[in-house]
Image (cartoon, grey):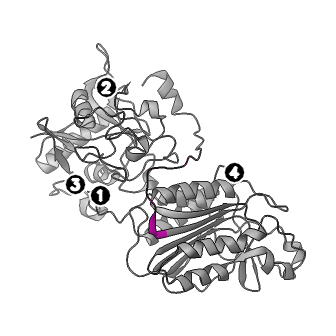
Amino acid sequence: MNCTIKCRLFLIMFFCWLPITGVKADSSKVALVIGNSAYLVGALKNPVNDAHDMSAKLRQLGFDVVERDNIKMRQIGSTLSEFRSKLSPGAVALVFYAGHGFQLNGENYFPSVDAEINSEEDVPNQSISIRQIIQVLDQSKTQLNLVFLDACRNNPFARSFRSAEKGLARVEAPSGTLISYATRPGSVAEDGSGRNGLYTSKLLKQLDSKQQIEQSLKMVVSEVKTESSGKQEPWMEGSIEGNFCFAGCGMDTPVTSTTEVQPTPTSRGPSIEMVRLPTGISMGKYEVTQAQWRAVMGNNPSNFSACGDTCPVEQVSYEDTIQFIDKLNSLSGKHYRLPTEDEWFSACQAGSSTEYCGSNDIDEVAWYESNSNNTTHPVGQKLPNAYGLYDMSGNVFEWTDSFYKVGSASRAIRGGSWYLYPASVRSAFRDGVEISDSYFNQGVRLAQDN
């Protein structure tokens, strides 16, 4: 890999929020997102960042978002009214709040940034209460309600209170409602040292999941507990009927469940969905996933293994990939291989001359530096190109079987990845990597002769 690109692998990426365009909001999915940082007392660093990143992701998923930064007392009523006006019977409603939160007499309150709370009596008129939010949802007769509260920081007004209760109180969630707290009721969460609070950073990753929401929230719990060394443990209340997955429930993901693809002496290997191309070969519809790699090799080398089985395998070298293909062919009786660079480029272009594989709009087809949140994403979430191939631009680089330069042993990789700028995700961009090197942006897509 050339020096400019290779060196960037070791830089700490700073994710900057950019508005996501080109996704039409769905009136059946409405979100209220609030981030409060600029308090007169007890200012916080991350909540506005949390709200920006959450809003961008939800808009990308088709939510109609009501977003407020640093909400003031005079805005509380109009904000709840606007949110209520967008809700309709049977809709999916989502509420995300980041900022200070505290409990008073068993009720949870989220103070406005201009709150001047000198006694407990000041709280109701200068805060949003969880009761108000639940009331809006109940009156709107929504089908599914999701409430996320990253609001368990230390209470800056505690000295004005007679009680000394920490964190938030448990809430009896009505039917059809899930409430997820950044930490256990009665405990306190940290604002976080990075761009996002710890809980929100893990929740943002799960918004790309095709797993049931209950499973996604379990992943949030596990990752927060691990990163905080057990000091912070998210909590969930309530229940829902039916299925809900943030990114759709895996209907278009060709990954067999882990229990079905574990390698055994009689296994034929995992299902690899191929697309027959006009050029006379077949190409993998998706990048090889972590589950598929593990089913063949019995391990998962991916740096982003916590992202889940449907994310592309990465951190695999050319040599690793050849071993994978040999074992897969032995298990399946088929003849998979790596595409040549020319085959890859032809499949990417799909008879067009677009700047990226399938579009001139990078956000339509690729996970890259500005929208990836510094991680890979489950395969098949962006639009396919004209041949029906997904993620050929972005997500992870893809190995080819062609030499990068004459006289060099390195192989060409194509497609760009989650950490690169648009110029390096273009259809025409190429790079080279030594066959024994593996990085957390390198994956594989299979080819096959018809």
**Front-most of residues 384 and 353:** 353
- The Cα atoms of the two marked residues, 1 and 4, are separated by 35 Å
Query: What is the number of the mark on residue 253?
Result: 1
In this rendering, the answer to whether 348 lies above or below 111 is: above
Disc 2 element: strand
Structural crowding at the residue carrying mark 2, measured as other residues with C-alpha within 10 Å and reported as few (<14), some (14–19) or many (≥20): many
Disc 1 element: loop
- The Cα atoms of the two marked residues, 1 and 3, are separated by 13 Å
Question: What stretch of residues is rendered in magenta?
Answer: 18-29
What residue is pinned by disc 3? 270
Closer to the observer: label 3 or label 4? 4
Structural crowding at the residue carrying mark 3, measured as other residues with C-alpha within 10 Å and reported as few (<14), some (14–19) or many (≥20): many
Secondary structure of the magenta portion, mostly?
loop
Query: What is the number of the mark on residue 193?
Result: 4
Mark yes or no: residue 180 visible. Answer: no
Residue at image point 76% right, 66% down: 72
Asked if the residue under mark 2 is in contact with the one under mark 3, i.e. CB atoms within 8 Å, the reply is no
List x then y, in percent, for residue 216: 46, 66
List x then y, in percent, for residue 292: 28, 52
